[in-house]
Amino acid sequence: VSDLRSSALPGSFDVSRSMFDLRSPPHRFMKRYDSLSSVPSSTSSRKDSQGSNRSLDTITLSGDERDFGRLNVKLCYISSVEQIWITVSHCKDLSWPSSCGEHPHIYVKGILTLPKPVHFKSSAKEGCSDMEFMETFVFAIKLQSLQAVRLVFKIQTQTPRKKTIGECSLALRELSSEESSHWLDISPPSK
């Protein structure tokens, strides 16, 4: 691998620390390379020097692994009234196929994958790379039922026609009365 110290990273005086220490905030334009080749390495199974897997999902990749954006959701479970509160906060760095037009109307559809699925959706907004929704949905469901299911989100266009442009999901094993915030990587829709 060529010497990366001449790159335009701010404060890149220590390449090994600034490029590969994943505890520091990731830079959107960074790519990770294998030491033996100049091919970007896999985001799922890289190990750091201590041998522990660390997620590299927040680093933007190019080509087939390009970033479809991220969805921020907040979750809270009020056990006294057996209610789950789901807030669809916002999408960041959202992208969509050119076939959807320049500014399609986009909304987020949520599904609680219970035996009888629970569906909900946000209002539609004009598409842009950073979209704020800030909509909360409340459902009365027993905690034991929720801990075995997933919360699936589909990012869909309303215009020019209904189309799923991305999806992401989250397991509900750890719900608490304290609101938790989750950044979910949006993937291309499954076939």
Image: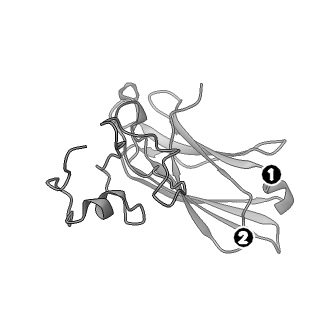
Q: Amino acid at mark 1?
A: Ala
Q: Which residue is mark 2?
A: 176
The residue that disc 1 covers is 148
Residue sitting at x 30%, y 50%: 30
Q: Nearer the viewer, residue 124 or 94?
A: 94
Residue 13 in view of the camera = yes
Residue 12 placement (x, y as % from top left): 21, 63
Determine whether 102 is above or below 173 in the image. Answer: above
Q: Residues within 10 Å of mark 2 (few under 14, many from 20)?
A: some
Q: Are marks 1 and 2 in contact (CB under 8 Å)?
A: no
The spot of residue 103 in percent (x, y) is: 35, 38
- Give the camera-side residue of 97 and 125: 97
- The reply, left or right, for residue 54 in relation to residue 36 is right
User: Which image quadrant for residue 189?
Assistant: top right
Q: What number is the disc on residue 168?
A: none
Dividing the picture into quarters, in which one does residue 67 lie?
Answer: top left
In the rendered image, is residue 142 in sight?
no
| Residue 20 at x, y percent in the picture | 36, 57
Describe the element under mark 2 as helix, strand or loop. Answer: loop
Measuring 52% from the left and 45% from the top, which residue is drawn there?
45
Q: Tell me residue 35's x, y (percent).
A: 34, 44
**Helix, strand or loop under label 1:** loop
Left or right: residue 11 versus residue 23 is left
In the rendered structure, which amino acid carries the disc numbered 2?
Ser
How far is mark 1 from mark 2, CA to CA? 15 Å
Which residue corresponds to the image point at 43% horizontal and 52% vertical from the top-left? 58
Q: Mark 1 or 2 closer to N-term?
A: 1
User: Toward the viewer: 39 or 102?
Assistant: 39
Left or right of 4 on screen, residue 34: right
